Image (tube, grey):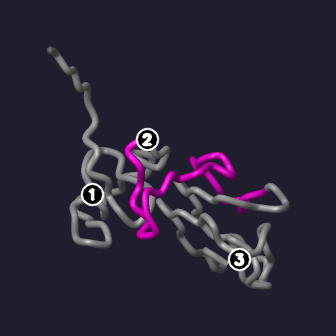
Amino acid sequence: GGINVGAGATVRNCIAYGNTGGGTSQGTGDAPIDIRGGLTPAVFANNLVGTSEDGELPEAATDCLPLGTDPMFVDSGYRLDRKSPCINAGKRLEWTRNSVDIEGNVRRGSRPDIGCWESDVKPGLVLMVR
């Protein structure tokens, strides 16, 4: 599975998309979300899960993108397209104020991106004048 957790685990700002298996399994290891022993994670928030045959997320799921949402990767390295719904969809916590992505880039703004990369898309308005 894409995310394998047990009781008391925290899963936040993660993407599980394009993994084999389906459903929310109870310890079989054959699903995007594998919950060991049928136990529920303590926190499962601000995540994107691509598939689930049973159409369910863990009971603890809050503020997750709708099941089946395409994260819009631009390459096999899991970088996000500038129109991805994962951009600025994460949750900033006190301990993440100075956190970095997988390459060491600082997570910017009040809402970090979901996933391992922080996009270089900057919020705001762009006007092109000729």
Q: Which residue is mark 1?
A: 107
Local crowd size for mark 3, using a 10 Å CA cut-off: few (<14), some (14–19), many (≥20): many
Is residue 70 covered in magenta? yes
* 3D distance between C-alphas at marks 1 and 2: 18 Å
* 3D distance between C-alphas at marks 3 and 1: 28 Å
Q: Is residue 54 left or right of residue 15?
A: right
- Badge 3 or badge 1: first in the primary sequence: 3
Which mark's residue is nearer the viewer, 2 or 3? 2
Residues shaded magenta: 56-83
Residue in view at x 55 percent, y 57 percent: 47
Local crowd size for mark 2, using a 10 Å CA cut-off: few (<14), some (14–19), many (≥20): few
Which mark's residue is nearer the viewer, 1 or 2? 2
Taking depth in this image into account, of 119 and 92 the one nearest to the observer is 119
Q: Which residue is mark 2?
A: 83
Q: Are marks 1 and 2 in contact (CB under 8 Å)?
A: no
Q: Would you place residue 31 above or below residue 130 in this image?
A: below
